[in-house]
Structure formats: structure tokens, C-alpha cells
Image (cartoon, rainbow, N blue to C red):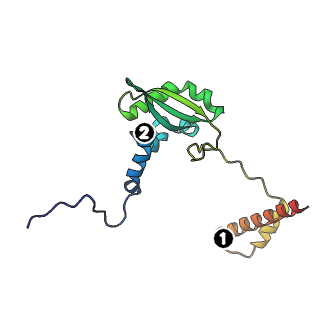
Amino acid sequence: MALQPPSPQRRFRGFEPASGLLRERIRAAGEKRGFAVTRLLTGWAEIVGEDLARMTRPVKVGYAKEGFGATLTLLVMPAHAPMIQMQLPRIVERVNACYGYSAISRISLTQTAASGFADGQAQFEQTPKPAPAPDPQIRADAERVASGVQDDGLKAALENLAQNFMLRAKSKEGKRR
């Protein structure tokens, strides 16, 4: 009896890499927006660098009716647009290196707010604002609440929880007045 090769529909036993499960869906979504190579979407930070990736998002690749050279559309926050404009030749070079040939001849910038469009494509990374220092009285009360706990990690977590609870109660009280 001859051995038959496994059917292509057969799945792995055990754990499967998530990339394998989502590969077809990512490819279909990418092709819908003109991305023949989904690596441009998934590896944007690797292609253009972390500094440019924080300020831009690839949205669409549009191909001309005749000839070569597609247009890559990038979302950018208005404050960063002049800096990105100066970096366009570098971005074109890096994206074409990803494709392996001169696929992109032009880049179009679309300025948008940090919150972006409804489908969440323009979620730019923003530096979080540091939390204000808690009131010394609230801090002392939170330390008093957690004073009997022996474990340092648990004690710190309990102090943090007590501070958050007291701050929230104080802000609700201030709103009622």
C-alpha cells in the first residue's frame, strides 16, 4: 500500500501560529486596498523605521491606468506633515526595497487628526500624559490602609487601589457641589 501525501486542507495538531490562521484574511483585506504585498502593512515600522512609523500609516496603493509607478497614500498628522514631506524620497526608496522593484513612484500625504478615521486606521502612537501626583492626605490614607500587609508587591497594589478609589470618590464629591 502506497503512502499518500497529506491533504492541503489538513490542519496542524496542537498549536498553530496566529499568522497562519490570519494570512488569507490579511491578504484579502490588503488586496482590496491595493496592497499586493501585505508586508507593507504588517511591517511598516520595519520598512520606514520607528520614527517615521509613529507619524505615518499606509492607507492605499493606487495604480495608474497606463505605465509604471503606483501612488502610495499615507496618513499623517498635520503637525508632522512638513517633516514627512522632506522624508518622502527616503520613504519611496525603502518601500521600493520592500517590493523588490520600483513599484512606488509617488507618495501622497493625507493629513488627519490623531484619532483618524472611523475604521481606526490612523491610530498614531501618542506619548501618554503623566498622572498628577496624588494629594498627600490621600497618599497617607492609602498607606495606612495597606500598613498591615507583609508582601511588598501586594502592599503596593493595595496602596494603588486605595489611592484610585479615594481619588475617584473625591472627584465625584467635587462634581456634586
Dot 1 falls on a residue whose secondary structure is helix
Q: Dots 1 and 2: beta carbons under 8 Å?
A: no
Q: Quadrant of residue 172?
A: bottom right
Q: Indicate left or right for 10 with 154 as reference.
A: left
> Furthest residue to the right?
177
Q: Is residue 139 visible?
A: no
Question: x and y percent of residue 98 in the render?
Answer: 39, 35
Q: Residue 54 versus residue 4: which sits nearer the camera?
A: 4
Question: x and y percent of residue 32 in the render?
Answer: 44, 42
Identify which residue is drawn at 9% across, 64% down: 2
Q: Label 1, label 2: how many angstroms apart (C-alpha)? A: 49 Å
Q: Residue 58 versus residue 147: which sits nearer the camera?
A: 58
Q: Quadrant of residue 94?
A: top left
The relative height of residue 148 versus residue 101 in the rendered view (above or below) is below
Question: x and y percent of residue 36 in the render?
Answer: 39, 39
Q: In which quarter of the image is the C terminus?
A: bottom right
Point out which mark residue 154 bears.
1
Residue type for callout 1: Leu
> Badge 1, how many Cα within 10 Å: few under 14, some, many 20+?
few
Q: Indicate left or right for 145 with 126 as reference.
A: right
> Badge 2, how many Cα within 10 Å: few under 14, some, many 20+?
many
Identify which residue is drawn at 38% across, 27% down: 102
> Furthest residue to the bottom?
148
Which of pointers 1 and 2 indicates the residue nearer the eye? 2
The relative height of residue 98 versus residue 145 in the rendered view (above or below) is above
> Furthest residue to the left?
1
Q: In which quarter of the image is residue 31?
A: top left
Q: Residue under label 2, please give it.
A: 35
Residue type for callout 2: Phe
Q: In which quarter of the image is the N terminus?
A: bottom left
